[in-house]
Amino acid sequence: MTPQELKERLRRQAAALPRANVPHLLEQFLALPQVEAAHTVMVFYGVGREPDTTALIDQLLAMGKRVALPVCLPQRKMEARAITSQDQLIPNHYGIPEPDGVCPIVPQKDVDVVLVPNMMCDRAGYRLGQGGGYYDRWLKGYTGFTVSVCPADRFQEQLPHAEYDVPVQLVLTDA
């Protein structure tokens, strides 16, 4: 089985799992010294099997953080845009809420911490995403701090990965 075939098999397995319920891991994320020191934090808006991040977004805003969310662009590219309220989110062509076009673009170099979504993660920080490669492209060359939260039922010892896959620096898990 090729690495790509194995990834697809793992994506099907992850898709059969219930939505990730990890409020304790999101609280650990908020307590990280890197998050506490950060001016700008980029987070994803959890959909499908991903954890619900709506409360996390509100907590970061209440802490006075500049909160950025990703916007999917053509050619599988992504940019970060800052929000001041979740009222500024509109569904994209995948149905994922993202900042509207009025929200300011946040240069990659200005993002201190990124909470990276995953379907599964491993010990080395590699993650299995949806397969579009948006985050891997955006994270290439990123010098800030990267984190994923991964419940025990999605945590793997080792995931298949390719040279273009970018691992996160820290995986918060209850595994």
Image (spheres, rainbow, N blue to C red):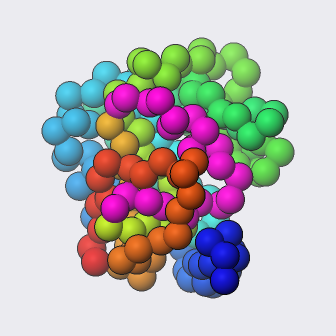
Query: Is residue 62 placed above or below 130 in the rendered structure?
Result: above
Reply yes or no: does residue 138 show up in magenta.
Answer: yes
Instruction: For the N terminus, give its image quadrant.
Output: bottom right
Q: Name the image quarter holding residue 72.
A: top right
The reply, left or right, for residue 1 in relation to residue 93 is left
Reply yes or no: does residue 19 show up in magenta.
Answer: no
Image coordinates for residue 12, horizontal then vertical, percent: 67, 80
Q: Is residue 171 visible?
A: yes
The reply, left or right, for residue 74 in relation to residue 46 is right
For the residue pair 9 and 41, the one nearer the viewer reads as 9
Name which residue lies at 74% across and 40% down.
76
Q: Is residue 56 visible?
A: no
Image coordinates for residue 174, horizontal then vertical, percent: 27, 73
Main SS, magenta residues = loop
For the residue pair 24 and 72, the one nearer the viewer reads as 72
Instruction: For the C terminus, give its image quadrant.
Output: bottom left
Image coordinates for residue 150, horizontal then vertical, percent: 39, 67
Q: How many marks?
A: 0
Name which residue lies at 29% across and 53% down.
170
For the residue pair 101 and 1, the one nearer the viewer reads as 1
Name which residue lies at 20% across and 45% down.
32
Query: Is residue 74 placed above or below 111 in the rendered structure?
Result: below
Query: Is residue 93 placed above or below 35 in the rendered structure?
Result: below
Name which residue lies at 62% across and 28% down.
79
The reply, left or right, for residue 31 in relation to residue 25 is left
Span highlighted in magenta in the image: 124-144
The reply, left or right, for residue 124 in relation to residue 142 is left
Image coordinates for residue 122, horizontal then vertical, percent: 39, 68
